[in-house]
Image (cartoon, rainbow, N blue to C red):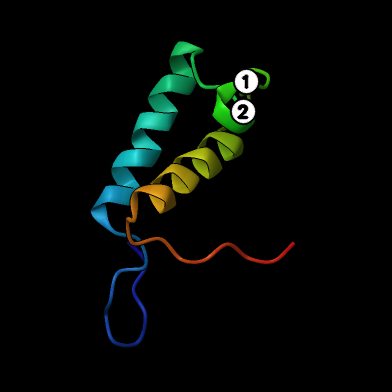
Amino acid sequence: MATGKRGSRRYGTGAGKSVASAMRRKKRGTLRSGKGGKGGQVKSRKQAVAIGLSEARKKGAKVPKKKAA
């Protein structure tokens, strides 16, 4: 994991597990976008990672804040 000047982890282990779970669901074809998974099927790795991090945030895992678009 990337560490800063003080050596603290940017992402917690719970965040990594959420992303890994999302990647597995993408591979199986069960990962869907949108609120409540009612959107289309996820095709890109980037989108799968974003969904995994979003789920980790909801669970309260250590994940940096989203960058403003």
Q: Residue at 40% of width from left, 60% of height from top?
A: 63
Q: Residue at 59% of width from left, 40% of height from top?
A: 46
Q: Residue furthest bottom?
A: 5
SS for tag 1?
A: loop
SS for tag 2?
A: loop
The crowding category of the residue bearing disc 1, from other C-alpha atoms within 10 Å (few below 14, some 14 to 19, many at least 20), is few
Residue 41 vs 5, above or below: the answer is above
Q: Residue 51: x and y, percent? A: 52, 39
Residue carrying label 2: 33
| Amino acid type, mark 1 | Lys
Q: Residue furthest front?
A: 36
Which quadrant: the C terminus? bottom right
Residue carrying label 1: 38
| Amino acid type, mark 2 | Ser
Residue 37 vs 52, above or below: the answer is above
Residue 53 vs 41, above or below: the answer is below
Which quadrant: the N terminus? bottom left
Q: Residue at 46% of width from left, 47% of height from top?
A: 53
The crowding category of the residue bearing disc 2, from other C-alpha atoms within 10 Å (few below 14, some 14 to 19, many at least 20), is some
Q: Residue 5: x and y, percent? A: 35, 87
Q: Residue 19: x and y, percent? A: 40, 40
| Left or right position of 64 against 12 | right
